[in-house]
Image (cartoon, grey):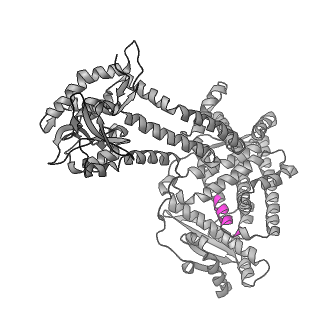
Amino acid sequence: MSGRKQHFIPQLVQRGFAAGKGKKSTQVYVFPRERPRFITATEGVAAQRDFYSPPSDEETLDDKITHYEGSVLAPAIAALREGEPGPIDSNAAAAVVVHLSVRSAFLRGTFSTATEELLNEMVKALGSEDETRSLLGLDSLSPDSMMVKGIDEELRKVLPEGVGDAEQAFFAKLVHFRGREKFAQIHTDLSNDASGVFAALLARLPEIVDNAHGRALGQSLVPQQRVDRLKAMTWALIEAPHGAHFVLPDCLAVGSKTADFRELEPYALLGDDELSGVVLPVSANKVLVGSTGEPRLDATALNEHFARCSKDFIISSRDDAETQGAAALIGTSVMKFVGDLVNETFAPPSPVDGVRAHDDKRSPSSVLVKFEPPARKSGKAQAVLRNLLSEPELEEGMNLVEYVVVTDNVLQSLINRGLQFNEMAAQSVMLGTCHLVETHGRVQCQLFVPISVVNSIVRGTPAAAGASKLIRHQAGRAVYYSYLTAKVPAEVWSKPAPLLTKEGLRAVQRVASHYFGARLSGVDDSLPQELSDALELWKRTTVACALEIGNARQYLIETNDADKAIPHAWVHAELFLTTTASTCAAFPGRGIRLAEALGACAELSDVPLADWLTLYERDLERYFENREAWREDEDLRLLATHLERLLWGFGVVLFEEGPDKVRMLALDGESLSQVRRALFG
């Protein structure tokens, strides 16, 4: 049976860095991190009671390691120390490096520190609803999201056999949406429960890490996968420069991702595929070096690298100024490793730099203003427009504006350019619009403004403030499209997608542009009466849209003509979302007030919209605030799901049916009641 004081850096390795030798012991200098250096016998260095295993009548892990040291490691280390500088057999070199690295306390300590930091950050994150949602992947549609995976797994357990893919997809969407809507209400309890679990984990962390390390070593003292990678390298012994010496880091070996060995990191923290080189000091005057190419190693700088890559201490044969200076760097690499791990897990994505789609900045004074008819041309009107468009928050949108049209009749000006409108679309542009044009892969905007609106500002009428907001609203929509084209690469939009997804993205871009327009049109200075009027207009519009969606559903039930029912339901759902988005911008942070207003509408009292409204406002706000970090269309896809969710409450379900076909199901009777109960519950 071996002793209870178990060395995680074998004494036979430490003796190669002897500062002095007595009759029964070898002494070394130990330089701990942030504590005074000292000299001591190797017996008490890098050792811990029952580090590998407690005593037992049966063979223990420590017994196996002691046997390996005597039969394999000791002869290999002795041969390396006695060998001449030059090439070395790769088999022996690989086994020595791998065994010493995987058995060390460095590995336990680093992963224990990293896990502790992650758990502490997790507890902090759970205190924030937004961060908790992010950790759970609650607001992600990715199949890798924890939430999406969990829903799919649970549905497979509870859904009866014979349920089709389309129906299963609907149930998954419904559960996911309901979870997102209700999460704000359950977050506090979830946070308290999870914090207690993490506190218990933190208390048991050392035990958990020790046991995991012991199990891994029990499976293999020399993991074959790591050995195979190192065996493929070319190995050599390199001697210390004249007058110099090498120290022993507590990580034992360091690795490099590049052949020049300029940036060295603890070998134990590097993946096999990352490695281009490895360095292990075998004595105070020799290092073992493995490389995939010709090693370009600066031996004079190695001690600083060894110190950086150590976690708690270095062992040295000398106490000199060079070693003292290097010791000040102990822990640097581990701190960076832990910091990078935490940041990678919890840090938000960094903003996308630069403007890709329109590098040539334009000023409002360079934007062409057209008058239709030309006889209406006015210098004062142009000055008013240019002054409004010069506001800093609208500047980004000017990069995309091809021209501004001031016209007697916005609808007719658009028709003259070849556009067609149904009755609802015609009404929506009467007070102005931001028309998107894509030619030869380039996106531009054309702003259309009624002459009456501009003249109201020129003449200083009581309606001038509202008229200014109308114009800024359309310019704010151009800002949205400017960010979208500048931040999200064009190839994102060229990805193949089913018809329902493509149409949803197109619709929600228009919706989001109106939210941006409302946010950037100066709504914060709205008077109470203006807000009240906006709320009443929203209620009338949403009730009218709800009626038309209901008509589309009834039409499908009576005629089974989905070709007419789908567009009718879709366009009114989009208008419902658009007017709600603009109103949410006018009432920032007051989604509950909007929900209360809807609840007071007798026409909508049986439709489950209150929780949805709060979530919709939140998703719009998050999309707006994250605009500098847009890279993909995931947030836009999430917004697009609100179209389907809104329709569910009115008894309309849409399914993908092949790449270019959408199927509409009109819920009736008990099916409608069940869906509404699920959305109310």
Between 676 and 202, which is closer to the camera in this rendering?
Answer: 202
Residue sitting at x 59%, y 52%: 636
Residue 515 is a magenta residue: yes
Find residue 546 and report its horizontal and vertical position in percent.
79, 51
Residue furthest front as drawn? 23
Q: Quadrant of residue 235?
A: top left
Magenta segment range? Answer: 512-523
Q: Left or right: 52 with respect to 677? A: left
What quarter of the picture does the N terminus occupy? top left
Q: Can residue 322 be seen here? A: yes
Residue furthest right as drawn? 602
Residue sitting at x 49%, y 57%: 490
Between 479 and 122, which is closer to the camera in this rendering?
Answer: 122
Find residue 109 and report its horizontal and vertical position in percent.
42, 37
Residue furthest left as drawn? 84
Residue sitting at x 76%, y 44%: 649
Find residue 323 and report its horizontal and vertical position in percent.
27, 48
Q: Left or right: 496 with respect to 53? A: right
